[in-house]
Image (tube, rainbow, N blue to C red):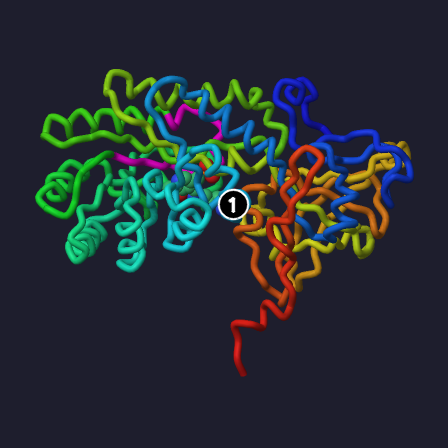
Amino acid sequence: MSRSPANSAAFPPAFSYREVRKGLFRRSSGTVLCCDEVPLTQLADRFGTPLYIYSNSSIVRRMRAFDDAFGKIGHTVCYSVKANSSLGILRLIAGMRCGFDVVSGGELERVLQVDRRAARKVVFSGVGKTKAEMRTALKAKILLFNVESESELWALAETAATLKETAPMALRVNPDVPADTHPYISTGLRKHKFGVPIAEARELYARASGSRHLRVAGISVHIGSQITDVAPFGAAMERVADLARFLREDGHRIDYVDAGGGLGIDYQNLSLPDYSEYVSLYAQAVMRPLRGLKVHLLLEPGRSIVGPAGALLTSVLYRKTNDSKKFLVVDAAMNDLLRPSLYGAYHEIVPVVMNSRSAARRESVDVVGPVCETGDFLARDRELPILGEGDLLAILDAGAYGMVQASNYNTRPRPAEVLVNGRSMKLIRRRESVADLFRQESF
Ligand code: LLP
């Protein structure tokens, strides 16, 4: 792999090559990519492909490093469920006493399914919460509603009134801070649908505090996702800190500041610092503007916890050449991993078995799936060792926004998911069957 070995030594990667004894598994001779200690060849034999694979230890290590970076200041890490919402992953995270950030009633139900008591550490964001979702969240007694518009504020007050409840709320403010990321996942500018303009927030807080069924509890912000420069996070927090001071002057109780998520990962050799150092730079940027405010900080990381801990394993179905253009047709497609097609996202792709033959000869190929669209690709013009039909490839950094964005397009059942821990492995989602897909339909 082209990732820096120095970094790997400091913060072990979820996937690394190991010498595997010849003949132990069907396809293993030479060096085999492993998740923790399990060769991916073994996982392919047992569970088939395409297959999502996650490293339990890597998720735990990343979560701990993230949490530790905020040191002793009062904070709760509310894992952003949208990044990977599989129950097996949520249970692992709930076991670490984390909170959760949800954006739908469905995500909330997932959290409650793995741990009923986790509700008191749940924050609920999103521009289109329905009253039914609000009701579920109020009954579950979640920690905080991040309200994104005045209309939503009154819907929440009404819903709380019908339940004779008081909803703890923060306004999600839009700080108008640019962040260098894909335009589809940047959220902190005035032109975006998210939050309320920070300049209007003071007025809205005043109105909210007039309702008996709303309890002003904090301020929230989220400027976007896959942001690898920590400066914009600091800039957003400066604005939030100023607002917190004004709101306190106005007599509001601002107990919480929710800094959102968004810390990016190294998809493409960006030479980011080692993860522990990287999260501590992020934590410093977020905490510095809040110094002296004595607020409880909420954080909503998703990608940076689970992204590098997961990979999508796929098999080469066919090699083909159209004129001089070479293609590897693999059994994973845009319906399994949408990020390359939707955002033009780069995911590193590596062969699972490395031997002297594959290391020596390389070629430029498009890695494409079986879906009937030109937009169905996993990589374009990618330099890879020369691979044959039946060979296995791992698409790295697929633990976040991979399975959650998978669909059944082309009536393709979604992949299975396996959670690896050291030498053991657990199937956390069985492979869908075509019969599963028919179950909801009638004719
Ligand atoms: N909090 C809020 C309010 C969010 O909207 C998001 C992500 C997060 C937290 C978590 O952000 P993270 O730490 O994962 O960057 N599908 C896209 C990413 C969409 C992100 C949406 N919001 C992708 O595949 O890149």
Tell me if 95 is positioned left or right of 243 in this view.
right
Mark 1: give few (<14), some (14-19) or many (20+) Cα within 10 Å.
many
Residue 331 position by quadrant: bottom right
Nearer-the-camera pick, 437 or 308 = 437
Quadrant occupied by the C terminus: bottom right
Quadrant occupied by the N terminus: top right
Residue 383 in percent (x, y) is at: 76, 38
| Residue 225 seen from this side | no
Nearer-the-camera pick, 92 or 370 = 92
Q: Confirm if mark 1 falls within 8 A of ligand 1.
A: no
Residue 117 lies within the magenta run: no
Name the dominant secondary structure of the magenta segment.
Answer: loop
Residue for badge 1:
84
| Residue 277 seen from this side | yes
Residue at horizontal 45 percent and vertical 20 percent from the top: 69
Please tell me whether residue 78 is drawn above or below residue 74 in the rendered image: below
- Residue range highlighted in magenta: 219-233
Residue at horizontal 64 percent and vertical 20 percent from the top: 7
Q: Amino acid at mark 1?
A: Asn
Residue 269 position by quadrant: top right
Please tell me whether residue 286 is drawn above or below residue 261 in the rendered image: above
* Element carrying mark 1: loop
Tell me if 4 is positioned left or right of 39 in this view.
left
